[in-house]
Structures are given as structure tokens and as C-alpha cells.
Amino acid sequence: MLRDRPVITLLPADDVERAKAFYAEKLKLPRAEIPVGTNDVAFAAGDGTVLYISENLAGARAQHAVAAWHVENIEEVVQELHRRGVEFEQEQDDFPGVEVDERGIIEMGGDKAAYFRDSEGNLLSLSEPAHW
């Protein structure tokens, strides 16, 4: 039943307009063609997945990555996003003892990852599995 359905990730935003600009301009994601609430916005990603951004009424934020993209060349993606003004985390509390390089990329057993925050403080990640 659910295994064939795309997943929509729900992300809180203190300022939905600011978040719209971040996802459209920095990540270059197109708007998703789905119904949204009055102040909400949705962006399309691969294979029918959607990032749904809504006003943060609860005031809570997750302390872990809330969305992740698998990429084929993380160095290239990090470089392009950095060029667009995305700043990558230089410290990673989830993996003690693992070094973060100057670009914000960590490597563990051949797997690579990089973490960054959106305009609203949501932690997002990129990953390049060793065995693609």
C-alpha cells in the first residue's frame, strides 16, 4: 500500500517567504503541483518526493537531519551549493571522532555526507553511499 507512494517531508518555517526563497534560489527546487495551505509552499524533488514547508506554530525543531538527498558526486554538489551561498556544518555531533573536511564533507567507511541548514534552521543532508 504505502511502498508505492511518494513521501512528503514536512518542514517547519518561522518565515515561509524566506524559506520559499531559500529552496527556490539556493537549492533550485521547482514548486510542486499539490494543494497547499494558505501560507504554505511545496517543492518537488526526485521520484515524486516533496518538501512541504509550513508555518511553524509549535515552535519545536528537530535536532537531527530532517531531509536527505542521495547524490552521485557529493564534492560537486557541495561546491555548487556553496557557490549559491549554502553554508555547510563544520561540526557533526552525531558522529564523534569523525573529521569534517574544509568543505563540510565527512567520510565514514567510504560513505560520504555533508550537512547544512535551511533558512529556518532545519538540518538537511547530502549523502553519497560508497556502494551506489
Image (cartoon, grey):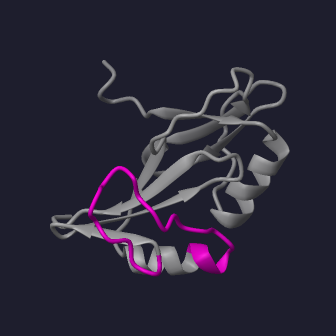
Q: Is residue 13 magenta?
A: no
Q: Nearer the viewer, residue 85 or 72?
A: 85
* 129 lies left or right of 80: left
Q: Main secondary structure of the magenta part?
A: loop
Which of the image's four quarters has the N terminus?
top left
Residue depicted at 61% across the width and 68% down the height? 87
Measuring from the top left, give residue 59's x and y in whole percent. Answer: 70, 26
Depicted 125 relative to depicted 34: above or below? below
Q: Quadrant of residue 106 in the image?
A: bottom left
Q: Nearer the viewer, residue 113 or 128?
A: 113
Q: Residue at x 58, y 72 (%)?
A: 81
Q: Residue at x 70, y 27 (%)?
A: 35
Q: Is residue 106 left or right of residue 18?
A: left
| Residue at the (29%, 56%) spot, across then down | 96
Q: Could you tell me residue 132's position as x and y percent?
A: 21, 64
Examine the structure image and report whether residue 97 is included in the region drawn in magenta.
Answer: yes
